[in-house]
Image (cartoon, rainbow, N blue to C red):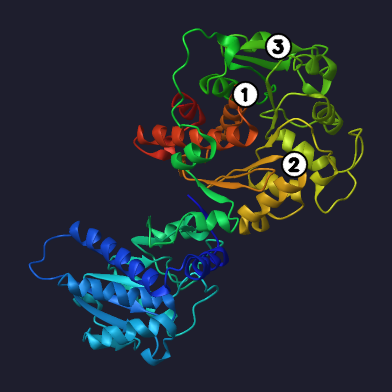
Amino acid sequence: MYLVTSEEMRKIDRYTIDSVGIPSLVLMENAGRAIAEEAFRLAETGAARGRPPRWLILVGKGNNGGDGLVCARHMAERGWETLTVYAVPPEQLKGEAAVQRDIADKLGLPAVVFEPGKLEWGRFDGIVDALLGTGTAGEPREPYASLIREANASGLPIVAADIPSGLDADTGETADACIRATVTVALAMLKRGLLLHPGAEAAGRTVVRPIGIPEGAARELGVNTFVLNEETLRRRFGLSAVPPARAANTHKGTYGHVLAVAGSRRMSGAGLLCAKAALRAGCGLVTWAVPEALALPLAGALPEAMIRGIADGGSGEWADADVGDALSAAADKQAVVIGPGLGRWTGDRGWLRRWWQTVASPLVVDADALNMLAAAGAGTSGSGPAAPSAEPFSAWPRRESATVLTPHPGEMARLCGLSVREVQRDRIGLARDFALRHGVVLVLKGARTVVASPSGEVYVNTTGNPGMATGGTGDVLAGVIAALLAQGMDATAAAALGVYMHGAAGDRAAAARTSPASLIAGDVVDWL
């Protein structure tokens, strides 16, 4: 399923009308019918009232308003009582919206022009929001703002046409005056702002309904952002969220060997979660590398993993660990994950540089290793302050082998030399640009995790829940992606499937508990 910006949707509309030849009035007719049908479904779930439903249709002067007028007509045909509320005098409507206004007039559909404080909201059972479409941004002006506020205050269920009025279709940012919808009917394709937060909350339950625009139009116009769900996994990668049955004549070596360079004296749990998640995600073998003094105490923590102690002079610290010895452990592995729970120490930049330049297998870089990347700048020795850079990561050379970076917004901000707010303002655009310029697969974690490929494709995840906002869940994700890489999966596919699996496991774990707030990272591992 494609995920589009307002400009991409505008071009897709024009392509459909001009090149495919489907008239705009046909698209508007289909849109209005789709909105009405969702209102019918919503009304069926409500209490019986012994009379026809009464709904308000809030209409703006653009094409979104035209969709609403078509919706009012279909409701009237069903026997519903409707009242069209024009935000502005109806003579201001233009184009197709004006055509629908004239049809509604000829049919005698009741209508009024909005006056603040004059509507009797309590007489009605529901609202259709057809005020502002995808082409608007920023704070709604009057009288739209007052109409939006009164609609929200009414407490009535609201069906939003394409996008809630006051929601930015591209970023998901919400204006002070923004419709809080019960259901949003996304027309033809999902707009980015409906999936990203905080827009997702304002949209309520979102459904996508066809209106006659061919899916090939998005492909023809080069749209390359997708909703990450089971359909996308199947169609884009040929993958299933449920692992396929294994052939009978296979063995542990068939499914790859992961090296997890993770955990330290204070944060051994991060390494444990990462290694265990890799095993749960299907790899055949995991070697867990830790400073040698920690190997014996941790030996029984995960019996299924092999512990590789790295010579450390008995200190138990990565600062004293022999990087050559550690690198030798990576020689025969199909994937390496580095970073969870490592900690930081003097010289760690040069230490990570050795891994970056030496490891030939696919590499997943997470947690403290990402902060080493951000701190390294142009330095290669790991001593002294990093050279200043507008984007600290830009000093690192491209790796020939597949590389997956898994930052949360704070780590991403450090990698890019930005603030967290700047990162969150355009997660999709920033992730795509970063992956393209640096030749990496970027997994920008958070609510609606973004997976960006070095070829420019972006996938926005639909699984996961707030209960996963707890320490260790990122370590689990790093292990899952490494396991999929070790099984021979392409880096973009491994990241996409790993992110989806990780979120789905979190959803299953949350559903099994009284409250998602009690979720811990180990629960996610157990539900993989």
- Judged by depth in the image, the label closer to the viewer, 1 or 3, is 1
Q: How far from the left and from the top, in percent, is residue 144?
A: 43, 81
For mark 1, does the 10 Å Cα neighbourhood hold few (<14), some (14 to 19), or many (20 or more) residues?
some
Q: Earlier in the sequence, mark 2 or mark 1?
A: 2
User: Which badge, 1 or 3, comes first in the chain's sequence?
Assistant: 3
- Name the residue beneath numbered marker 2: 439
Residues at badges 2 and 1 in contact (C-beta under 8 Å)?
A: no
The residues bearing labels 1 and 3 have C-alpha atoms spaced at a distance of: 23 Å
Identify the amino acid type marked 1: Gly
Q: Which residue is denoted by mark 1 in the rendering?
A: 488
**Badge 3 local density, few (<14 within 10 Å), some, or many (20+)?**
many
Q: Which mark, residue 308? A: 3
Name the residue nearer the viewer: 526 or 9. 9
Q: Which quarter of the figure has residue 34?
A: bottom left
Considering only order in the chain, which callout, 2 or 3, is on the residue closer to the N terminus? 3
Residue at 53% in and 34% down: 497
